[in-house]
Image: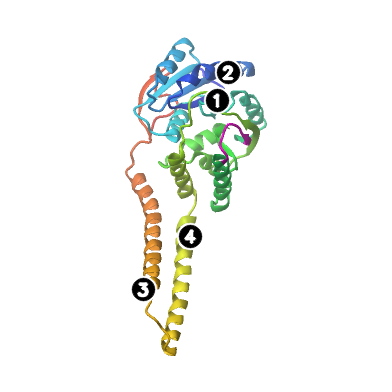
Amino acid sequence: MIVPEISVVLPCFNELANLPELRRRLVTVLEATGRSFEILFVDDGSRDGSFEAMAAFATEDSRLRAVRLSRNFGHQMALTAGVDRAHGRLVAVMDADLQDPPELLAEMLARADEGYEVVYAQRTAREGESAFKRATAHLFYRLMRRWTNVDIPVDTGDFRLLGPRAVAAFRSLRERHRFIRGMTAWIGFRATAVHYVRPARLHGETKYPLRKMIRFALDALTSFSHVPLQLGTWLGFAVSSFAFLYILVVIALKVLGINERGWTTLMGWILLLGGVQLMLIGVLGEYLGRIYDEVKGRPLYLVSDEVGGEPGVGGEPR
């Protein structure tokens, strides 16, 4: 088979309304580059007929492929499946909600031609999002940058272009709790940013409500930082130091004969120490649960159907 110059990977979950416009804009942009390409749609257990639309696209155009996972494995796993199975020398990953503008690919390819292995799209503004979402995203990226030992670019999503060495390195990383923005930063190589204003969703609603965002943030933090464990240690020292000083105060009051029985004080300390202990047990549980998931050695995802291209070429789940 002829290896395309670029593969564009699109993880999709219930994005039927966006797919026709996404296909049109992507094909227009990629044809204008004059490069050979393929577009790989990865259906992550959609229930709105998204895969049927993708399969129809793949039947009409040999440059398009459609992969359906056996169930909903999550956005990061669907993205991984697409990179694993991509045929192109360069691999671009982007969301299917059109908040990642396909037109930015031309500039990203130009930067890759300059020798950059990772070209990531960095947001200068976010349209159509609440002040709460913008504020929490701003805080998240800066805390991650401060608390991790990896230089993760701020205000970036998963929209990025990977060169051959970056693709090979990414495929070698098989951890289950995946934070792909951190993983592509961890592999190193020359990287650069392309700036853009992130538009509002054209159709549908976000697939990352607050509950999923919190889980995503926990995965990101525990994958690239030991700070939660270190915070537990620091908090333990702080509480122990304060408790030691308080014991000295109690002894002094006893010696002076002015010590009074204090039910409120006693219960306050019991609840404080109990809460700290439970919190630290929870932090340990988060890390232990991730170790448990890793040692089971299950595949990251399973593919149910594939339309277009040659099934199995470009990588299999490991």
How far apart are the two marked residues, 4 and 1, measured between alpha carbons?
39 Å
Residue 256 on image: x %, y %: 44, 89
x and y percentages locating residue 79 in the rendered image: 46, 31
Label 4 belongs to which residue?
231
Q: How many marks?
A: 4
Horizontal and vertical percent for residue 110?
A: 66, 27
**N-term mark: 2 or 1:** 2
Q: Secondary structure at mark 2?
A: helix
Q: Label 2, on which residue? A: 25
Amino acid type at image mark 4:
Leu
State the image quarter where residue 270 is shown.
bottom left
Q: In the image, what residue type sits under mark 2?
A: Arg
Residue 268 lies, with reference to residue 148, above or below; the image says: below
Q: Which residue is mark 3?
A: 263
Point out the frontmost of discs 1 and 3: 3
| Cα distance in 3D space between marks 3 and 4 | 30 Å
Question: Mark 1 or mark 3: which comes first in sequence?
Answer: 1
Q: In the figure, is residue 271 to the left or right of 35?
A: left
Q: Amino acid at mark 3?
A: Trp
Residue 129 magenta: yes
Check residue 152 for magenta coloring.
Answer: no
Element type where label 4 sits in the image: helix
Q: Quadrant of the C terminus?
A: top left
Residue 32 on image: x %, y %? 63, 16
Name which quarter of the figure residue 159 lies in.
top right
Kindly report the distance in space between the C-alpha atoms of the residues bearing marks 4 and 2. 47 Å
Q: Quick check: can you spot residue 308?
A: no
Give the secondary structure at mark 3.
Answer: helix
Q: Mark 3 or mark 2, which is nearer the start of the sequence?
A: 2
**Upstream in the sequence, badge 4 or badge 2?**
2
* Residue placed under numbered mark 1 in the picture: 98
Task: Please provide the residue range marked out in magenta.
Answer: 123-131
